[in-house]
Amino acid sequence: MAKLLYQGHGSYRITAKDGFVAYVDPYAGKGYDLPADLILVTHQHGDHNAIDLPAKKPGCLIISNEEALEGGRHNSFEVGGLSIRAVHAENRNHDPKKCVGFLILVDGILIYASGDTSKNRRMEALSRENINYALLPGDGIYNMDLDEAAECAEIIGAKHNIPVHLKPGQLFDRKLAQEWKAPNKLIIDPGEEIELG
């Protein structure tokens, strides 16, 4: 069964049941010892793109916002059994021409790695994707606040909504996570790994 390790802030690791390892926005916390097959970077802010942090297998592929937006469109990738599709991300601090979110299909489980975003009109399309896990920011400083993140969760309709990127400069804020009024909320503490199902 695929697993997700939340490392803190906006960083997490996905491990497929065959052992394929992907890191999303490496920067925070621990758990970078499993060598990466794939590293995904939603944008080039320093708290999302520490690509030297994870151990890497030979031939490790890095897909950043630059590859994801090459040709002026949101691109798709097939890597080691994972299907990855770049999707729109934006807010007042993040230019949609320089940042993305990712839809990641691993072992039949669809994960929405939102990156740094706020509510936008293209989120309506995500409601038709049957997302299993949506990881949504809610710091209210660089991204939307918790109320807006709850609205996004309602729009997207994922089976599980995971709060991340809640307090810049810290791994996590459990109190804020508990206050989040999103449907189907799933709180994961930094260093905690869950089985995806």
Image (tube, helix red, strand yellow):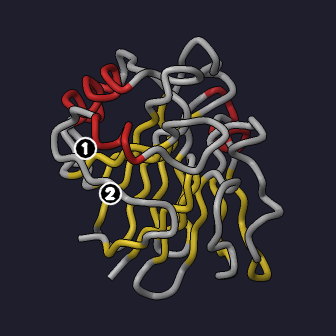
How many numbered marks have been drawn onto this rendered protein structure? 2
The dot on residue 110 is 2
Badge 1: few (under 14), some or many (20 or more) residues near its Cα, within 10 Å? some
Mark 2 vs 1, N-terminal side: 2
Res 8 quadrant in image? bottom right
- Relative horizontal placement of residue 49, taking residue 163 as reference (left or right): right
- Relative horizontal placement of residue 101, taking residue 169 as reference (left or right): left
Q: In front: 121, or 189?
A: 189
Image quadrant for the N terminus? bottom left
Q: Amino acid at mark 2?
A: Leu
Whether label 2 touches label 1, CB < 8 Å? yes
Residue 148 location in percent, x, y? Answer: 33, 20
Res 92 quadrant in image? top right
Q: Amino acid at mark 1?
A: Glu
Q: In front: 133, or 10?
A: 10
Task: Give the Cα distance between marks 2 and 1.
Answer: 8 Å
User: What secondary structure is found at the residue carrying circle 2?
Assistant: strand
**Residue drawn at the location 76% of the way across and 76% of the way down:** 55
Image quadrant for the C terminus? bottom left
**Residue drawn at the location 22% of the way across and 45% of the way down:** 158
The dot on residue 129 is 1
